[in-house]
Image (cartoon, rainbow, N blue to C red):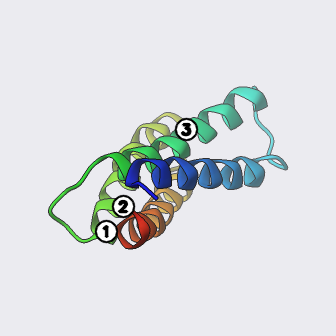
Amino acid sequence: MSRIWLGVLCGLIYGALDAALMIPMQFSDKRAAITGALINRFSIGFVIGAIQLPWPGWATGLFIGVLLSVGDALITKAYIPIIGLGAIGGVIIGLVVSRFGH
């Protein structure tokens, strides 16, 4: 599978999992919070699939996962869970895309 399509697929799965984790949580605007998380996590997968840095796949994933998660973490002030999940998801997607993408 091409890197971009694999990144899209991984981003959709990652976004859906993250959105599912948020369902039991309380937010003032739950729909906006879940939609924002879904878009952010999808973006991580898409960007990892779309770029090629001269680094190992896990390092690219870690960098992009953290980079794209910092904005949401600053807004919500939930630094550890948002950046942590961004880093973990980014590493996993980076490994998958580097191993199975072409």
Q: Are marks 3 and 2 in contact (CB under 8 Å)?
A: no
Q: Which residue is mark 1?
A: 57
Secondary structure under the numbered disc 1 in the rendered image: helix
What mark, if any, has residue 82 been given in the picture?
Answer: none
| Residue drawn at (39%, 63%) of the image | 101
Which amino acid, mark 2?
Gly
Which amino acid, mark 1?
Gly
Q: Which residue is mark 2?
A: 61
Q: Are marks 2 and 1 in contact (CB under 8 Å)?
A: yes
Among numbered discs 3 and 2, the one appearing first in the sequence: 2
Q: CA distance from mark 3 to mark 2?
A: 22 Å
What mark, if any, has residue 76 been given in the picture?
Answer: 3
Which mark is nearer the camera, 3 or 2? Answer: 2
Q: Nearer the viewer, residue 61 or 3?
A: 3
Q: CA distance from mark 1 to mark 3?
A: 29 Å
Mark 1, residues whose alpha carbon is within 10 Å: few (<14), some, or many (≥20)? many
Which amino acid, mark 3?
Thr
